[in-house]
Image: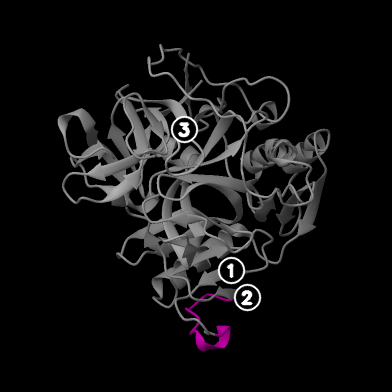
Amino acid sequence: MQKKVRLCLAVLSVVCAVVPALGVGAAAAQVSGEPEPTRRVATGDKPPVRDDTGPRDPVPGGFADWRALFTEQARLNGVADRLLAVSEDAEGYAGIVADPENHEVRLYWRGTVPRAVQDVVTEGRLAAPVAVLPAAHSRAQLLEEVDRWVSSGQVTGAAPLADGSGLRLSVSGQDTEPGELHRPSGATAPITLENGETFEPAYSRLDDVPSYYAGGRTRNLTTGAGCTSGFAVWDRYDNRAFLTAAHCGELGNLFYDGGGFTPANYMGPVSERISYRDAAVVRADATADMFDGGPTSSSSNRVVALWKAHVGNFVCNSGSRRGEYCLIKVTETAWSGTYTNGQYVKHMVRAKSVEGGCAVAHGDSGGPVFSYTNWFDEVAAQGITSAVGSPVYCGGLDGGRVIVFSRVWDVALAFNAYVMVH
């Protein structure tokens, strides 16, 4: 059976939150506020091939295994989510880091921390260590400077650093020095550069059938572009659908699976899109499952939750070209920039391979970015792959060590959609 998870904004005194109840442990740590109403629906009759082996990549950070890493990360994220809810719009907030390798949540603040935030810090320390650290700049100030830098045309992207110390700018030049850039008017915060970064939409498992899983190959009849199916949703009209990247298709474009442009492979039309989020909805018979493993894999995991991604988190990409890869760490959560196709995106998540390897390949666009929960056959939806940066060898594929993705949480709100979960 599947449940329908609805996100909504706080209105007056009513707070709407995530997610399905998953019992004790990592998944339960993600729940904050009152649970949303859910609706059970009948699942399709496509027999799943389950895989509970988890990530195949080497385990980072001295953890005994990936289960230990994701359990610790979920413990920290549960606290980070509650802190973000009371901090994000408050004066002085700079950022949050929830890196499982630190074994603590770090909250950065400029000035005096408000009483309401202090109360949540105290409550959060019952679940995980929380460090409150001083910041030189607030997130609000740095976001204003991000817009100035991106509008200046000198950078390919920009984001505030979570510790409030300044900005990280992406530039196309391989050897550009900070002093070579002309500061826009009003931009005073320190900058660090990521050289050689241009960001291309990641165009390009093989031949899925209804009900469609996240992570399968898609083809656009109009453009021929190949992308990847994202997480399943109910759209604003209560139709089954899946998320993908906006650059993968315009409104009304028809999507087919990887089997070719024949009636048997028809998926559905692009029914909604938001360019600056690089997100779109394809109305099709989709369900709450996700392909894992390599690009030719037929095994899958159950989608059981919807989580936010915080700076320091490890996340996994499971695109139809690259396949599953989990040695990816979030570096910024409010990245804005301009892609090589001229598309401007705002408040995206930037992450990169911790080993300098291939994090994402062309053709992964629209596909799932996720974390494992307590169990290796269950995952939490976190992102929709958007772009690839910093080219590296990808085993014959065109890809890079940097991935940019939109948060499913934000996109679901924007589309007034429900995320399908088991």
Q: Magenta part of the protein: which range?
A: 177-191
Q: First in sequence: mark 1 or mark 3? A: 1
Asked if the residue at tag 2 contacts the one at tag 1, i.e. Cβ–Cβ closer than 8 Å, the answer is yes
Q: Which residue is mark 2?
A: 190
Q: Is residue 88 visible?
A: no
* Residue at 72 percent of width and 56 percent of height: 109
Q: First in sequence: mark 3 or mark 2? A: 2
- Quadrant in which residue 295 is drawn: top left
Q: First in sequence: mark 1 or mark 2? A: 1
Q: How is the image coloured?
A: one colour
Q: Secondary structure at mark 1?
A: strand
Which one is in front, 357 or 83?
Answer: 357
Q: Is residue 96 left or right of residue 244?
A: right
Distance between mark 1 and mark 3 Cα atoms: 35 Å
Asked if the residue at tag 3 contacts the one at tag 1, i.e. Cβ–Cβ closer than 8 Å, the answer is no
Is label 3 or label 2 in front?
3
Q: Secondary structure at mark 2?
A: loop
Q: Which residue is mark 1?
A: 167
Q: Is residue 182 visible?
A: yes
Amino acid identity at mark 3: Met
Dot 2 crowding, Cα within 10 Å, few <14, some 14–19, many 20+: some
> In the drawing, what numbered circle is on residue 13?
none
- List x then y, in percent, for residue 269: 22, 35
Q: Which residue is mark 3?
A: 290
- List x then y, in percent, for residue 6: 47, 25
Amino acid identity at mark 1: Leu
Q: Is residue 189 magenta?
A: yes
